Amino acid sequence: MNIILDNLTDPRVLALLQYHLDGMHQNSPPEQVHALDVSDLQLPEVSFWTAWQDDELLGCGAVKELTNTTAEIKSMRTHANHLRKGVAAGILDHILMIAAQRGYSQLFLETGSGLAFEPALSLYKKYGFQQGDAFANYEASDFSQFLFLKLE
C-alpha cells in the first residue's frame, strides 16, 4: 500500500469522497453530518492522503489541525472493493506517524452511532482511542461520539 499526500484532483478520489459524503448523509441525521467536502479538505489546515495499490484507489483519510499540538481525524473511508483488507488501519498508522512528526500531543475525532459506524469505532478503540467530550465547535448529541488519543 502506497499512501500519498493528495491534491484532490483525481476523479477516482472525488468519487470516493462523494461516496463518503453520501454514506454520512444516509446514516446520520442531517444536522449531524460533519464530513468535509472537497473545498474544506483543501484548506491550509487540512492534510489529505489517499492509499493506493499500483493504480487502484484503496481509501483516504485526513487530518485537520486544531492547534499547534492537536488535530482531528477526518474523512476516513475505505473503498467498497477493499473493505476488511487493512486499508483503514494502514491509513490510521500513517496519520499517527505524521502526528508524531508534527509533535501533536492529542488526536480527536467525531463519529456517529449505529451499525454503519461500528467498524470505524472498533478500529479506533483497537488503537487506544477513548470516549471523550465534544471538542472544537462540536456540540454533544445522542448521535455523535467523540474520541481522543493522547500521543507520547
Image (cartoon, rainbow, N blue to C red):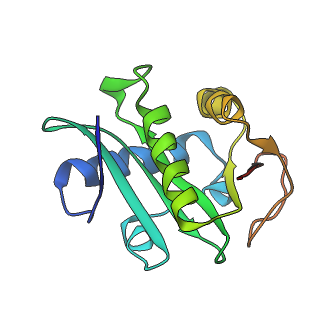
Question: From where the camera sits, is residue 61 visible?
Answer: yes
Residue 117, given in percent of the width and then of the height, sits at: 63, 34
Report how many numbered discs are placed on residues in the image: 0
Which quadrant of the figure has residue 27?
Answer: top right
Residue 26, given in percent of the width and then of the height, sits at: 53, 41
Residue 17 vertical placement versus 129 (above, below): below
Q: Please report the residue visible at 63 percent of the width from the left and 45 percent of the height from the top.
A: 28
Residue 100 vertical placement versus 58 (above, below): below
Q: Please report the residue visible at 14 percent of the width from the left and 35 percent of the height from the top.
A: 54
Q: Please report the residue visible at 47 percent of the width from the left and 70 percent of the height from the top.
A: 46
109 vs 61, left or right, is: right
**Residue that sits furthest to the top in the current view:** 84
Q: Please report the residue visible at 52 percent of the width from the left and 61 percent of the height from the top.
A: 101
Which quadrant of the figure has residue 5?
Answer: bottom left
Residue 147, given in percent of the width and then of the height, sits at: 75, 48
- Nearer the observer, 6 or 118: 6
- Nearer the observer, 37 or 31: 37
Residue 20, given in percent of the width and then of the height, sits at: 43, 46
Question: From where the camera sits, is residue 34 visible?
Answer: no
Picture quarter with the N terminus: top left
